[in-house]
Image (cartoon, rainbow, N blue to C red):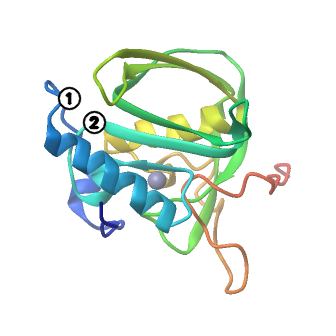
Amino acid sequence: MSVRRVITVGDPRLRRRSKKIEKITPALQRLIDDMIETMHAENGVGLAAVQVGELLNVILVEDPDDVDEEGHPRLYVVINAEILRHNAETEAGIEGCLSVPGYVGEVERYTQVLVRGLDRRGKRLRIEARDFLARVFQHEIDHTQGILYIDRLTAPDRIWPVEEGEEEATEASQRHQTAAAPS
Ligand code: ZN
């Protein structure tokens, strides 16, 4: 496993659609392992393969507050991820992105989504996610479509630099920071 370099905004690959994966291969397993190591090294709560330069539809999501029975965070690896259903309700929240370093912005997201895809062994998978977890899935699935959170700001000025010493902006982070009410 190795930590891969995360590409940042301006790199044209972030604007392309990722390819659907047709075959589960050892190379794909290595990519997934590298992505996991990279996400952990960057303290991200999610990562899409395109962010390490691979235009393949694979995403990771790991929300520290979404834990299993033993209290360990659940790591979701989803191949060919898509949103099958979502509720009507949306909520504004603050997001960051490893590919947009130094900034956070306000984005409106569905509060519940049903995600469909394959696990890393190729088995069909459905995940019901709500609130922050749903936000991270929407952010990562957007990456597979060439969409960045900065395309979805609630208003063009709802983006802010992260000041030095403040919590580093990580992938779809800043969960505890509540968005200010629009004035
Ligand atoms: Zn991102």
> Residue tagged by mark 1?
20
Q: CA distance from mark 1 to mark 2?
A: 5 Å
In this rendered view, identify the residue nearer to me: 157 or 57.
Answer: 57
Q: Position of residue 108 (x, y in %)?
A: 65, 39
Which residue occupies 25% across, 65% down?
11
Which residue occupies 58% across, 59% down?
96
Q: Which mark is residue 39?
A: none
Tell me if 61 is positioned left or right of 17 in this view. right
Q: Decide: marks 1, 2 in contact (CB < 8 A)?
A: yes
Is disc 1 placed on a helix, strand or loop? loop
Q: Quadrant of residue 156?
A: bottom right
Q: Position of residue 16 (x, y in %)?
A: 22, 46
Q: Is residue 50 above or below residue 22?
A: below
Q: Is residue 168 above or below residue 52?
A: below
Q: Quadrant of residue 166?
A: bottom right
Amino acid on which the number 1 mark rests in the picture: Lys
Q: Quadrant of residue 180?
A: bottom right
- Please tell me which of labels 1 and 2 falls first in the chain: 1
Binning the other alpha carbons within 10 Å of mark 2 as few (below 14), some (14 to 19) or many (20 upward) gives many
Which residue occupies 49% across, 71% down?
101
Amino acid on which the number 2 mark rests in the picture: Asn
Binning the other alpha carbons within 10 Å of mark 1 as few (below 14), some (14 to 19) or many (20 upward) gives some
Q: How many marks?
A: 2
Specify whether tag 2 is near ligand 1 (CB below 8 Å): no
> Residue tagged by mark 2?
57
Q: Position of residue 129 (x, y in %)?
A: 63, 25
Is disc 2 placed on a helix, strand or loop? loop
Which of the image's four quarters has the N terminus? bottom left
